[in-house]
Image: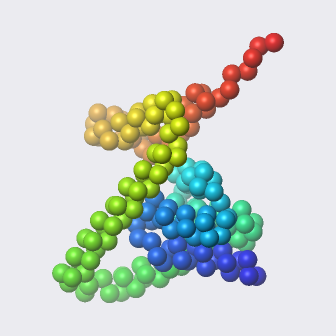
Amino acid sequence: MKAYLDIFIAFMKISLFTFGGGYAIIPMVERELIKNRGWATMDEVMEYYTISQITPGLIGTNLATFIGYRQKGVLGSIFGTLGYVLPSATLVVLAAIFISNLAEIPEVQHAFTGIRIAVGALVLDTVIKMVKNNLKDAKGLVIYIMVFICAVLPYGILPVFVKSPVTLVLVSGLAGLLIYREKKEKV
């Protein structure tokens, strides 16, 4: 039972002490899951993030499910997911109760401005780390540039489905498969 509680607590800490979700949680994931617990490597976490981009649900929730499953099977995935979701769900319920009064307070608005800036810095740090870890050659750089261009072009220039993250990830995966697969020698 201790192993399940460890999974629950690890993901509860990640959920409680990070703001912004998605890529903003990577520094906490790196510290808590990779360095402190050794449950995954950064490459494995990035693979889980990639899978999470094309599966339904939130990235952090999917990550908790994948790593919990890897540690202790189905029950591990349930404990990981609950650990990640419960703090946020509790805060959302509390915020819904009190938000109408709090949203008008200038200090609260200023605090959220600061939090958004901090989350932006954390996401930028994560993007820089991901680019350094994943761009190993010119072929990868070409895929990166093409996806970046498709992502930032305004709507109307490209069809909406092309700008979809699912489409970009799937096309990038296909490009990686075609570009990086090893050619078999003919005998």
The percent coordinates of residue 83 (x first, y second) are 59, 76
Residue in the picture at 25% in, 70% down: 113
Classify the position of the N terminus by image quarter. Answer: bottom right
Q: Is the residue 54 above or below the residue 73 in the image?
A: above
Give above or below for 48 relative to 175: below
| Closest to the observer, 44 or 73 | 44
Q: Where 172 sits versus 27, above or below?
A: above
Residue appearing at x 27%, y 40% in the figure: 154
List the single residue furthest toward the right.
187
One can see residue 81 in this view = no
Residue 152, located in which quarter of the rendered image?
top left
Residue 163: x and y, percent? 39, 41
Res 156 visible: yes
The colour scheme of the drawn protein is rainbow
Question: Image quadrant for the C terminus?
Answer: top right
As drawn, 63 above or below 186: below
Question: For residue 34, which quarter of the picture?
Answer: bottom right
Please provide percent x and percent y for residue 149.
Answer: 35, 36
Relative horizontal placement of residue 175, taking residue 4 as reference (left or right): left
Q: Residue at x 57, y 33 (%)?
A: 176
Q: Residue at x 46, y 45 (%)?
A: 131
Q: Give how far across and how far down residue 12 sits, in percent.
A: 56, 77
Q: How many marks?
A: 0
176 vs 151, left or right, is: right
